Amino acid sequence: MKALYIAASGMAAQERNVEVISNNIANMRTTGYKRQRAEFQDLIYQTIRRAGSLTSDAGTQVPAGIEIGSGVKTASTSRIMSQGSVEPTEKDLDVAIRGEGFFSVSLPDGRTAYTRDGAFERDATGQIVTIDGYQIEPGIIIPGTARGVSISDDGIVQAYLENDSSPTQLGQLQLVRFVNKAGLESIGNNMFVETDASGTPQTGVPNSGSLGGLLQGYLELSNVNAVTEIADLIAAQRAYEMNSRVVAGADEMMSATSQLR
């Protein structure tokens, strides 16, 4: 009985849906996290009677055919790249992006990753790095004698050195944008890498063109909405429950058939 397998595909799809929702909820407080949404497609159909087929020599046609679907599949877990809320941290090297763009990060394997997580630190050499110790691009070094580090909304990093009465520019933070940022591949640690679907990175100065500006002393929180996730979770649970009832109903029908005398 096909109903068993159709309902089973629905249960599997809703199980995947709950997994996506649970990951969103788990990352509600993850800096720069972007929520995901499971999207589904119906599976191939068995055509028993095709619409428009002839029913007589006079040319009459079937107005509506007979097609039996075979269930559902998970088509994608697309990422919603909307802006998350920003939260003050009172830390000089915390930087939030307000608008479009990603920070570039050099990975140990030579690849370049991209992140919205601006929780930066200084390593032993004064280099600005991520909390995992990965260098940002382009590299900026803050000397140990520097004081009063400031980061402008267009990414200029300045500090007072030793007894200087005026600040010295130490470098320029840059941002990267993609034509299809939802096509980036997540690699964990709040980072993404380029794919063929995302397009090539376009680098620029913050607050220029379509790139957003920077906020020193702030961090961007995740864009997960708790109420929306709980509502989606309830809907997924009910869909799973209804599919399980179809399985039970199909089983009862098969049991009744096997008991016919």
Image (cartoon, grey):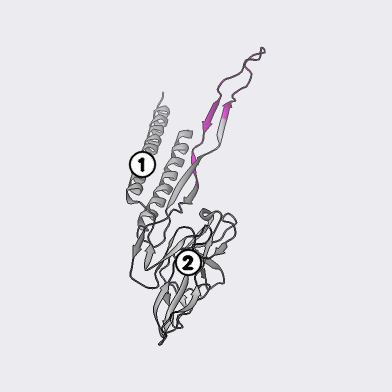
Q: Is the C terminus in the top left, top right, bottom left or bottom right quadrant? A: top left
- The secondary structure type at the circle numbered 2 is loop
Q: Residues within 10 Å of mark 2 (few under 14, many from 20)?
A: some
How far is the residue under mark 2 from the one under mark 1?
43 Å
- The residue that label 1 is drawn on is 235
Q: Quadrant of residue 164?
A: bottom left
Image location (x, y in percent) of residue 45: 55, 34
Q: Main secondary structure of the magenta part?
A: loop
Q: Is residue 116 visible?
A: no
Q: Of 1 and 86, which appears nearest the observer?
A: 86
Q: Is residue 224 left or right of residue 61?
A: left
- The residue that label 2 is drawn on is 154
Q: Of 245 and 24, which appears nearest the observer?
A: 24
Query: Which region of the structure is painted magenta?
Result: 47-75
Query: What residue type is disc 2 on?
Result: Asp
Q: Residues within 10 Å of mark 1 (few under 14, many from 20)?
A: some
Residue 201 on the magenta span:
no
Query: What residue type is disc 1 on?
Result: Ala
Residue at x 35%, y 72% (from the top left corner): 91
Image location (x, y in percent) of residue 125: 46, 83
- 2 or 1: tag closer to the N-terminus: 2
Q: Is residue 98 visible?
A: yes
Residue at x 55%, y 22% (from the top left corner): 64
Image location (x, y in percent) of residue 90: 33, 70
Q: Is residue 156 left or right of residue 226?
A: right
